[in-house]
Amino acid sequence: MDTSHHDLSGLFSQLGLPGEPQAIDAFVAAHRLDAGLALADAPFWNRAQAEFLREALADDAEWAEAADELAMLLSQNR
């Protein structure tokens, strides 16, 4: 049974990244998602991270909402 919190912090943890608010803010400040580029296709993910995001969004999985939130945050970082 998956007992993970399916929020932005939990998504970062699933991606192997620090999930503290300050770490998330720093990541968003340092990365940008160009218009028209899918979140999973961004060049800053490794293969495993990209595949996790791709599956989460394609399957409308429990992580999809957090992934959508991350995509929005990275798209606003211009």
Image (tube, rainbow, N blue to C red):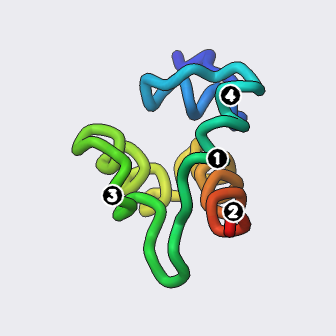
Q: Which mark is drawn over residue 43?
A: 3
Q: Amino acid at mark 3?
A: Pro
Of callouts 4 and 1, the N-terminal one = 4
Q: Answer above or below: position of 11 versus 2.
A: below
Residue picked out by circle 1:
28
The quadrant holding residue 13 is top right
Asked if the residue under mark 3 is in contact with the one under mark 1, i.e. CB atoms within 8 Å, the reply is no
Q: Answer above or below: position of 69 versus 19.
A: below
Q: Amino acid at mark 1?
A: Val
* Quarter of the picture holding the C terminus: bottom right
The furthest residue to the bottom: 36
Q: Which mark is drawn over residue 7?
A: none
Helix or strand or loop: what does disc 3 sit on? Answer: loop
Of callouts 1 and 2, the N-terminal one = 1
Q: Which mark is drawn over residue 77?
A: 2
10 Å neighbourhood of mark 2: few (<14), some, or many (≥20)? few
Is 29 situated left or right of 43 in this image? right
Q: Nearer the viewer, mark 4 or mark 1?
A: 1
Query: Where does residue 57 sit, x and y in percent of width and height?
Result: 49, 58
Asked if the residue under mark 2 is in contact with the one under mark 1, i.e. CB atoms within 8 Å, the reply is yes
Residue picked out by circle 4:
9
Of callouts 3 and 2, the N-terminal one = 3
Helix or strand or loop: what does disc 1 sit on? Answer: helix
CA gap between label 4 and label 2 equals: 18 Å
Is 34 situated left or right of 52 in this image? right
Asked if the residue under mark 1 is in contact with the one under mark 4, i.e. CB atoms within 8 Å, the reply is no
Helix or strand or loop: what does disc 4 sit on? Answer: helix
Query: Where does residue 67 sit, x and y in percent of width and height?
Result: 59, 51
The quadrant holding residue 52 is top left
